[in-house]
Image: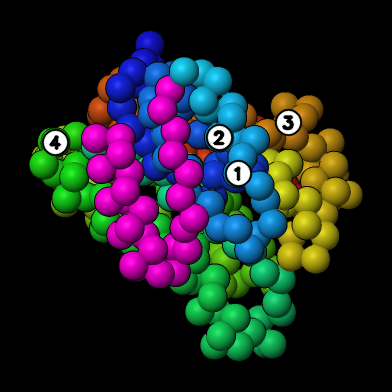
């Protein structure tokens, strides 16, 4: 099951965290993988490239700025040229910035929207012509429990963007479902990753540890947990899963915040 042999996947934000784990998991399932990464983030994509290559699958790396249509278009075109097709896009690149709502400037709002919402759309828009031609595609995006099932104070722009990708997915699911293309979003809860461990713009190590202790499963989430769900959603077996938001947080959002 969940055999992705000879499928081609593009993963953005692939140098660390959920993106890195997902790229490796897709390759282990048989897919060739293009790794979109943003060098200014400070994460080295080379260890991920090596892990993917060690599976025996083809791998590309591409410096990618999802706020630039030209950069995204070039990345997708390069993937199609070098790997032969574009079957799966996992729009995972994202940023979080802590800003009290009354202090949130247009520039700060727009930056998060350009990366987290418009960036995902640029990736999908560039890949869709290849998917339509092949009559097969998987449009997948990393949303969040913030803005979908919970609030996150001082992150109103992040919450709005992560809610926005769900609306985008639902419309694309209906518009392209008849063309062999499905669209779904994953909403992770607290997952130990470079973003969540950032004490300035996210929860920091202490907050992540508290969330893990308070989870009904007795542990925190891992990037590999999210990657496993993405492998399913990218597969043939997920062909009837379309337009959905899948919450992946161990049931934490079912509890009152006082627990």
Say which quadrant the N terminus sits in.
top left
Residue 116: where, in percent of width, then height?
49, 62
Measure the alpha-carbon separation of dots 2 and 3.
35 Å
- Secondary structure category for the residue under label 4: helix
Q: Answer above or below: position of 188 versus 166.
A: above
Q: Are marks 1 and 3 in contact (CB under 8 Å)?
A: no
| Tag shown at residue 134 | 4
Q: Which residues are magenta?
A: 57-84
Q: Who's the residue at 54% across and 75% down the image?
A: 111
Measure the alpha-carbon separation of dots 1 and 3.
34 Å
Q: How is the image coloured?
A: rainbow
- Label 4 neighbourhood size at 10 Å, few (<14), some (14-19), many (20+)? some
| Tag shown at residue 49 | 2
Q: Residue furthest right?
A: 206
Q: Who's the residue at 40% across and 19% down the image?
A: 30
- Residue 75 counted in the magenta span: yes
Residue 161: where, in percent of width, then height?
49, 65
Provide the residue designation for mark 3.
216
- Secondary structure category for the residue under label 3: loop
């Amino acid at each position: 099951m969940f055999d992705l042999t000879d499928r081609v996947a593009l993963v953005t934000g692939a140098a660390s965290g959920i993106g890195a784990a997902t790229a490796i998991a897709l390759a282990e399932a048989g897919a060739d993988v293009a790794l979109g990464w943003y060098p200014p983030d400070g994460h080295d994509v080379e260890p991920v490239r090596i892990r993917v290559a060690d599976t025996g699958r083809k791998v590309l790396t591409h410096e990618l700025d999802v706020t630039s249509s030209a950069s995204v278009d070039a990345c997708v075109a390069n993937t199609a040229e070098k790997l032969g097709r574009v079957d799966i896009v996992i729009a995972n690149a994202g940023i979080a910035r802590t800003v009290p709502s009354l202090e949130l400037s247009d520039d700060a709002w727009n930056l998060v929207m350009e990366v987290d919402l418009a960036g995902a759309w640029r990736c999908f828009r560039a890949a869709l012509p290849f998917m339509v031609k092949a009559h097969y595609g998987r449009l997948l995006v990393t949303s969040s429990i913030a803005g979908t099932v919970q609030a996150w104070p001082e992150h109103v722009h992040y919450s709005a963007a992560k809610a926005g990708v769900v609306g985008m997915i639902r419309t694309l699911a209906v518009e392209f479902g008849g063309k062999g293309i499905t669209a779904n979003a994953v909403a992770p809860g607290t997952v130990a990753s470079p973003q969540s461990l950032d004490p300035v713009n996210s929860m920091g190590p202490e907050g992540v540890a508290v969330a893990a202790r308070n989870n009904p499963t007795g542990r925190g989430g891992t990037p590999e947990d999210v990657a496993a769900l993405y492998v399913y959603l990218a597969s043939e077996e997920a062909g009837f899963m379309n337009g959905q938001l899948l919450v992946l947080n161990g049931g934490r959002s079912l509890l009152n915040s006082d627990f």
